[in-house]
Amino acid sequence: MTAAPTTLNRPARKNPTKNLLKTRELGIVLALALLIAYTAIDNSRFLSGQSIRDNLLNTAILAVMATGQAIVVITRNIDLSVGSVLGISAFTVATMMSSNPGLPMIVAILVGLAVGAVAGLVNGVLVRFGKVPALVVTLGTLYIYRGITYSWAGGSQVNADELPRHFLTFANDSLLGIPWLVLIALVVVGAGSLMMRNYKVGRELYAMGSSPAAAELAGIKVARNLLTAFVLSGALAGLAGVLYAARFGTVDAAAGSGYELNVVAAVVVGGVAVFGGSGTVWGAALGALLLTVIGSALAVLDINQFWQQAIVGALIILAICADRLVAVRIARSLRKRDAHV
Amino acid sequence: MSDTLTKSATPTRTGKGNLRSKLTGWDTIIGVLTVLVLIIASFAVDNFGTSRNFTFMVLDLLPIILIALPMTMIIVTGEIDLSVASTLGLTSSMMGWLWNQGLSIETIIPLCVVIGAVCGVVNGFLITGLGLPSLAVTIGTLALYRGLAFVVLGDGAVADFPWNYTGWVTGTLGGGAVPNVLILIVVLALIFGIVQHATPFGRSLYAIGANAQAAHFSGIRVARTKFWLYVVSGAIAGLVGVLWTLRYSSARADNGSGLELAVVAAVLLGGVSIFGGKGSLPGVLAGVVLLTALQNALRLEDVSGQALNIVTGSLLVLSVLLPNITTAVRGNWHRRRLRQAAR
C-alpha cells in the first residue's frame, strides 16, 4: 500500500483512465451548457434569477439523495429504499413539527437524519451480515418502510397550515441570496465529493466497488465501510425528507413514492457505473441537475411535457453506452501498455 | 458454491441430501405457506371462498403471474428486466391510439404483442449486442417506454373497447366458476414450466446463470439465449398490456406503473436467486399466489392494502435471509463434526 504511490506516480499522470473519466463529467457539463444555451436563446427568461432559483430548488432534494446513492453504487451495491425512507422521514418530521410547533429547524433536520440513518443501518446490516444482495434487501425495505408509513398515517396527511411558519419559510429563506435548501445540497455534495476523493474511507469504498474480494483481502474493513455507505445513503434520504416537508408543506404517506428511480437515474446519468468502483459524487449531483433542467427546459421550449420521461430514459441509455465506450477504450489501452512491457 | 462442492465431494450422500434439501427447500416452504394461507383464509375470511372472489383473485393474479414466467428465466440467467411494466403501459397506450385510428381489435391485439416484442428486442440488443448491464439498461428503458406511452396517449384514456372482448377477460367459462383467463394462465405456465424444467434450453439457462463464461465454452449460445428471453419477456408484457386494458376497459399511459417491482419481488420470494443459476417455476407460481391471496384476504378484512407492503417486503427479505442463516448454521455444524472426527 505505502509503496504503491512511488511506482504509480509517473504513469498516473499520463494514465488515460483519468483523462477519460474527466471527459465523462465534462460530457454532462457540456450537455447541460448546450441545453441551457439553446433554451435561453429561445426564451431569455430561462436565465432569470427566478428561473435559476426554481431549478436549483428543484435539484436540491434530488442532489442530496443522489449523493448518498452514488456512494452506495460506487461500492457495487444499490439502495432502492430511498424513496420510502424519504416518505417515513418526511411524515415523522411533519407530524413532530405540527404537534410541537416550538421546535427549532435544526431539531427537525437532526430527527430526519436519525430516522434515515436507522433505516440505512437496517439495510446495511441485512446486506453485510445477512448476506442478502442489496437489490433484494432494499427492494424489500422499499415495501417495508412504505408500509410502516402507510399503517401509521393511514389516509391522513399533514397540511401546510398545521406546520409552524419557521419550518415552511425555511425552504424559501436564504443566506447571502442562496436558499437554505440549495446551500444544504451544496454542502452535502461538497462533503460527499471530498470524502470520496480525499479521505481513506472514500478510497476504500472505491476499492470495495472495484473488487469486493480483493478489498477484503487487502485488509479493508469492508463491514464497517459498507455500513457507513448505507447509513449515509439512509441519513441523506432522511434529510431529503425534511427538505421535502419544508418545501411542499403537505405530507402524506405517499411522499417520495417512485423517487428511487429518479435518484438512480441521476446517478447513472452522472457517470457512476452500476458495477461500482467508478464515478463521482459531484457527477451524480450534475446528473440530478441535468434531469431537473431538462424538465424545466421542456416547459420553456413549449415541448409536450410528456416527452420528459422518454428523454430521461434515452439519456440513461446514452450514459451507459458512454461508460461502456470508456471502459472498452481503457481496457484496450491497458492491454497495449501491457504488451510493451 | 460450497453446497455444490460438498455434494460432489461426497457423492454417496447426494440422494439423501437431495431429499432433505427438497423437503427443507424454499420451494416447499413457500408452497406449504401458500396452501396454509388459502385454507385459513377460506375458513376465517367471509366471502374468500366464493367463486366471485375467486374470479377477482385470478384477475389480480393475471398480470404478475404472466410477466413472472419469462422474468423467472431472465433472473435465472443472472440478468433482470425492470422495463416490463413500462412495456405494458406502452402497449396499453398504443392499443388505445390504434383503436382511435379505427383499426379492428383483431388487428390491434397481435400488433400490440409485436410492439411488446420490439421493446424486448431493444432491451436484448442493448444488453447482449452492446454488452451493457441489464439493471441499468432496463432502468433506462423503464423511463423510456413509460415516457413514450405518455407521448402516445397523453394523460387521457380510451375506454370504448368492444364489449365481447372486455367481457371475455372478466368473464368465466360458460358462466361457471372458472375464469376465462385462468385457462390462459395455465397454458402459458405449462409451456414455460416445460421449457424451463424439461428441455436442454431450460437447463442451459441455469448453466448461464451459474457461470456464463463456462456456459459459453460448453457451446451454449449465451448472448442469443439472453436476447430471445428479453424478446419473449417484452411480448408477454405486451400481451399483459392488452389484457390489462381489456380488463379495466381503459387504455391509459400509466397502466401497470410500479408492477415491475411486484413481479421481481414475487419471483425472488419464489426462491429464485438474484445472482442467477437457482430457482424453480413452481416456487415462483406459489410465491405469486401467496402474495395475491394474502392481499385479497386482507382486503376482504378491510386491512389497508398498503399496510400489506410490510408483509410483502418482509417475506422478500426473509426468502433470502432464512436460507443463508440455515446454510451458515449447517456449515458450523458440519465443521464442528469434522473437527470432532479429526480428534
Image (cartoon, rainbow, N blue to C red):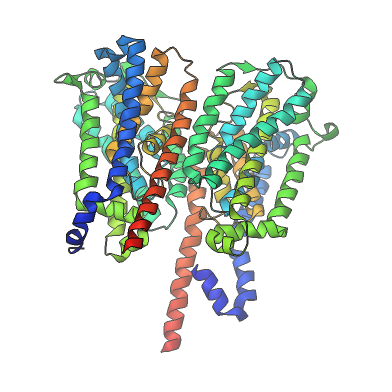
Query: Residue at 52% of width from left, 73% of height from top?
Result: B5
The percent position of residue B20, horizontal first and vertical second, equals 61, 70
**Quarter of the N terminus of chain A within the rendering:** bottom left
Residue B26: image quadrant is: bottom right
Eyeballing the image, is A42 above or below B225?
above
The percent position of residue B40, horizontal first and vertical second, equals 64, 47
Query: Residue at 49% of width from left, 40% of height from top?
Result: B137
In the rendered view, does A260 fall on the left or right side of B214? left
Residue A2: image quadrant is: bottom left
* Viewer-closest of B154 and B325: B154
Whether residue B46 is visible here, answered yes or no, is no
Which residue is most to the front? Answer: A340
Eyeballing the image, is A183 above or below B211?
above
The percent position of residue A148, horizontal first and vertical second, equals 43, 38
Query: Residue at 25% of width from left, 36% of height from top?
Result: A189
The percent position of residue A242, horizontal first and vertical second, equals 29, 30
**Quarter of the C terminus of chain A within the rendering:** bottom left
